[in-house]
Image: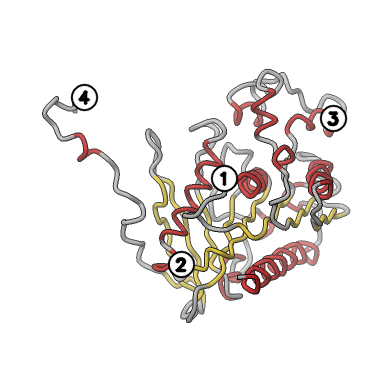
Amino acid sequence: MTDAAPASFPLHLLAPPDPATLSLPHPAHPADGVRLLRGAVYAVPDGSRPLTADLWLPEDAGAPVPVVVFVHGGAWRTGLRDDLGPRFRSWRPGPFARLARAGFAVVCLDYRLSGEAPYPAQTGDLTAALAWLHTRADDLGLDTARTVLWGESAGGHLAALTALTRPARTGTATVTGCVTWYAATDLPGLAEDRPGGAYDPRDPGSFEALLLGGAPAERAEAARDASPVTHVGPEAPPFLLLHGVDDTLVPARQSVRLAEALRAAGHHPDLRLLAGGDHLWVGLSEQDVEDCYVRTVDFARRCTRDAEGAS
């Protein structure tokens, strides 16, 4: 195959298909009352792989259902779109099937990792996913006016950033709530929150540097822009922030910083700091891990119920 098409070749034939018009995947039935559409293409960024999503849907809902968009962690460098972490891998049925049984559509997204594209590509991908969901709402039985973003670790950072910076226009899902689990929220503040030299903002090999395309100390404006605390304003949706007090990877102070910024803007975030909890909920009892999940589901239910009553 040559590097360039002949001058007479119709280049429009090389353009990728519009994800809004592609056929949806054939559904599987991983649990009673649940349909799973695995690998639906929601975006085809130029020069990148197609981005896909898994959709866990209630069987025979009868009416459009609220949406929970899950954003996976992995230090912006790795991760699987349908992995909530090691504490949940043995659950049967799994956490997303349980959410679908509770009446939610759950959308687990791929996004471009830092080895593929630097920030802000990742939030652009999430915004594209929200627009795609809105476009396909009738096909999928979704009420995208009731959408909650939920992410863990790096995914929590991206969920919060997207919730606080989403375009104020029609043609996309409406974010009515955001849940973060042990997420970074203030990249410039990490140096203070990780005492004893555990974090060096001049290190070009840190996960934050790989996300930003350079050491945070040298990319100060990008680091600030990539911090959810920077974008808190009067239009912020409700937040649930869960973080382990003993987190050795992302200090709990990061969730405190976002909660303080939200309160300063007149909001009432629900901040829960869990004693004994490390990253990925290492150190917590099974009961405490279950409680984190239940709190998340209850929060999503409140956010989507309140939005339904206001519409």
- From the viewer's perspective, is residue 172 above or below residue 308? above
- At 65% from the left edge and 74% from the top edge, which residue is drawn? 309
Tell me the distance, in whole angstroms, between the alpha carbons under discs 4 and 1.
34 Å
The answer to whether 5 appears left or right of 43 in the picture is: left
The residue that disc 4 covers is 4
SS at badge 2: strand
- At 80% from the left edge and 47% from the top edge, which residue is drawn? 265
SS at badge 3: helix
Q: Earlier in the sequence, mark 1 or mark 3?
A: 1
Amino acid found under the numbered disc labelled 2: Leu
Q: Earlier in the sequence, mark 2 or mark 1?
A: 2
Amino acid found under the numbered disc labelled 1: Gly
Tell me the distance, in whole angstroms, between the alpha carbons under discs 1 and 3.
27 Å
Say which quarter of the image contains residue 165: top right
Q: Is residue 134 visible?
A: yes
Tell me the distance, in whole angstroms, between the alpha carbons under discs 2 and 4.
40 Å
Image coordinates for residue 307, horizontal then vertical, percent: 64, 68
- Asked whether the beta carbons under mark 4 and mark 3 sit within 8 Å of each other, the answer is no
Density class for disc 1 (Cα within 10 Å; few <14, some 14-19, many ≥20) is some
- Asked whether the beta carbons under mark 2 and mark 1 sit within 8 Å of each other, the answer is no
SS at badge 1: loop
Amino acid found under the numbered disc labelled 3: Glu
Tell me the distance, in whole angstroms, between the alpha carbons under discs 3 and 2.
43 Å
Q: Earlier in the sequence, mark 3 or mark 2?
A: 2
Q: Earlier in the sequence, mark 4 or mark 1?
A: 4
- Asked whether the beta carbons under mark 2 and mark 4 sit within 8 Å of each other, the answer is no
Image coordinates for residue 73, horizontal then vertical, percent: 62, 46
Q: Nearer the viewer, residue 237 or 24?
A: 237
- At 39% from the left edge and 52% from the top edge, which residue is drawn? 41
The residue that disc 3 covers is 192
Q: Earlier in the sequence, mark 4 or mark 3?
A: 4
